[in-house]
Amino acid sequence: MPHTTIRSRLVVLAAAALLAIPAVAGAQGAYPFKPNPDNQDLLAYWYPVPADSVVMQYSGKTWEFSSMLHVYGAAPEGPFEVTVEARRDKTLLFRRTFKIVDRKPAEGSFTYSEANGYFRIEAKTDYRPERPTEIAVAVQEGKTRRTRTIPCTYHTIKGTIRDINGRPFRAFLSVGADQFTSSVTVWSDPEGRFSIDLPERTYNVFYVDDHTYRVSTLEMWGWHMIVDRDETFDFVVGNGEVYNLHAWASNGGFATYFVYFRPMVLPSLEHPLEKTLLNGREFRVIDVAPRLTPDDVTVRINGAKVELVSMQEIFETGTPDNALTAMPAYLVQVRRDGVPPNGKITLSVEYDTKITVNDRPVRVRSVGYTQFYNRFTGLSFYY
């Protein structure tokens, strides 16, 4: 989805292309090491979603939804072919060969990219209700052929979507494996209920909103979402957003988590430009954030509210238009007494506050999520 320079997304995409096995099973293939001889670098995921679309009000552009195939592997030096077969038991669901010459598609409609010596192929596929049980990948460079058959595991992510006042909100859920938004997107029903079957892996983002993005709503974000089981969520779409949410344990003496996020509001609610000095340099403050107090913020770990120890305002910086730009963000410290030291953590941040716009109070609310395993990172070869 396009964004203006002011709303430039200053985030490192730390997406994890995990194998089709549970992240806690201790069998992450080659992570975080180099590929081993049995071709563990070859990965493939099929995302079966019905074709659909949405026309975004703020841009007038159409966002197309479709089933997608993603394929990963170590990139050969010369021209090569990648053949993919998706099967359900013994029934062939899909077969296609992708030809790569001079680091780009030789023919056909698909997207090819490379990062750190590994490739990613993205291709639209026809929707089928069957879920594949395995995907076979073959990479052919000259006389050298490498193959791997990847078992497929799917999990159902479902729940409800509500608006700022708790009412059902018809919206769409988009999942980006290693990008912001993608064609892998499904609508909820008029009651806000949604359901999507996803391949087991870690996703860079979950994105929830409707066609009113940037007009009357901002998106709900889930960051580093680990799909390793069926899960149910109650997402809230408001007029703010919890952006760049990240959390990590403080293991240096305090039983706490540090939680970083950048709150944002609708463009119509933004503050005038300011300036601030950081490290002796003057930065232009793009004040897209509501100014929060500890009383405005609620942090939950696995659904339970935790005690907020402190909250500090800091700045996220960048150089759009070759100008030194700073955006307000927050570093929150919360207690983690009673939180299991191992296992999956789902952490949510909600802010609920009022700001003054044209001499009247306006309620601003948003909720964001992130997931992680203590003592586990699981980054992919691609990033």
Image (cartoon, grey):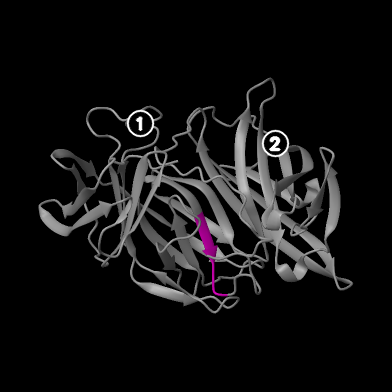
**Which element carries disc 2, helix, strand or loop?**
strand
Question: Is residue 383 toward the left or the right of residue 84 in the image?
Answer: right
**Mark 1 belongs to which amino acid?**
Ala
Q: Could you tell me residue 123's position as x and y percent?
A: 31, 60
Residue 44 makes an appearance in the image: yes
Crowd around label 1: few <14 · some 14–19 · many ≥20 (10 Å) = few
Image side of residue 178 versus residue 74, left or right? right
Residue at 45 percent of width and 50 percent of height? 178
Q: Nearer the viewer, residue 311 or 165?
A: 311
Q: Earlier in the sequence, mark 2 or mark 1?
A: 1
Tell me the magenta residue range. 206-211
User: Seen in the image, is 187 located left or right of residue 8?
Assistant: left
Label 2 environment density (alpha carbons within 10 Å; few <14, some 14–19, many ≥20): many
Amino acid bearing label 2: Val
How far from the left and from the top, in percent, is residue 57? 58, 78
In front of the other: 270 or 155: 270
Q: Circle 1 — which element? A: loop
Is-magenta flag for residue 210? Answer: yes
**Which quarter of the image is occupied by the C terminus?**
top left
Q: Is residue 18 above or below residue 366?
A: above
Residue under label 1, please give it. 25
Prevailing secondary structure class for the magenta stretch in the rendered image: strand
Q: Residue furthest right?
A: 359
Q: Can residue 304 be seen?
A: no
* Quarter of the rendering containing residue 127: bottom left
Residue carrying label 2: 334
